[in-house]
Amino acid sequence: MSGVPAVVLVGPMGVGKSTVGRLLAERLGVGYRDTDQDIVTAEGRTVAEIFVDDGEAAFRALEKAAVRAALAEHRGVVALGGGAVLDADTRALLAGQRVIYLSMEVEEAVKRTGLNVARPLLAVNPRKQWRELMEARRHLYEEVATAVVATDGRTPEEVAQAALDAL
Ligand code: S3P
């Protein structure tokens, strides 16, 4: 398979990229791909294990390669990990793609993810860490996005519909 993916989903962890991505792919009649899942499959380890064993920088290098491969190979819906936009080369790769930023407020994020040890960036003091993450990343999501879909108080089906409407 080759060509440009139909839609790329970005946004913070827990915002529903995987759930919404699958719904969106179904409605568009295309495949779904998730770069976190690609990394886990290739490495045979969870994201948390990679963070603990090798550190965040090593994970980011794997992530950058996974995003590049997914964008080159997959024609469909691609969901990126929440931190993928931290990389300038990745942001450059997203230029010219249809990129939907699924957004949520900090309080919604705390409510949805809580204390989630499977997400290593939130292991301590989730509210403070969420605030910092959102402050550091919001402008990066906005930079790459061609559309923004707010998810607060919406079901995944409603978000998928809003994303379809935004295409
Ligand atoms: C991360 C988000 C996670 C995963 C890793 C780091 C981040 O992906 O890539 O835990 O930096 O925001 P999801 O957004 O799919 O949870």
Image: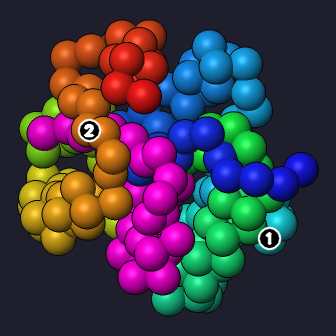
Amino acid beneath label 2: Val
Earlier-in-chain disc, 1 versus 2: 1
For the residue labelled by badge 1, is the local secondary structure a helix, a strand or a loop?
helix
The stretch of residues the image draws in magenta is 80-105
Is residue 157 shown above or below 108?
Answer: above
Is residue 34 shown above or below 136?
Answer: above
Labelled pair 1, 2 in contact (Cβ < 8 Å): no
Q: Nearer the viewer, residue 13 or 110?
A: 13
Of labels 1 and 2, the one closer to you: 2
Could you say which disc has been placed on residue 158 in the image? none
Query: Does the Cβ of the disc 1 residue fall within 8 Å of ligand 1?
Result: no
Question: What residue is drawn where x is 22% and y is 30%?
Answer: 150
Q: Nearer the viewer, residue 37 or 80?
A: 80
Classify residue 68 by image quadrant: bottom right
Is residue 88 shown above or below 25?
Answer: below
Q: Mark 1 points at which residue?
A: 43
Amino acid beneath label 1: Glu
Is 90 one of the magenta-colored residues? yes
Q: Mark 2 points at which residue?
A: 148
Q: Where is residue 106 in the image (x, y as percent from the top left)?
A: 12, 44
Residue 42 appears in the picture as rendered: yes
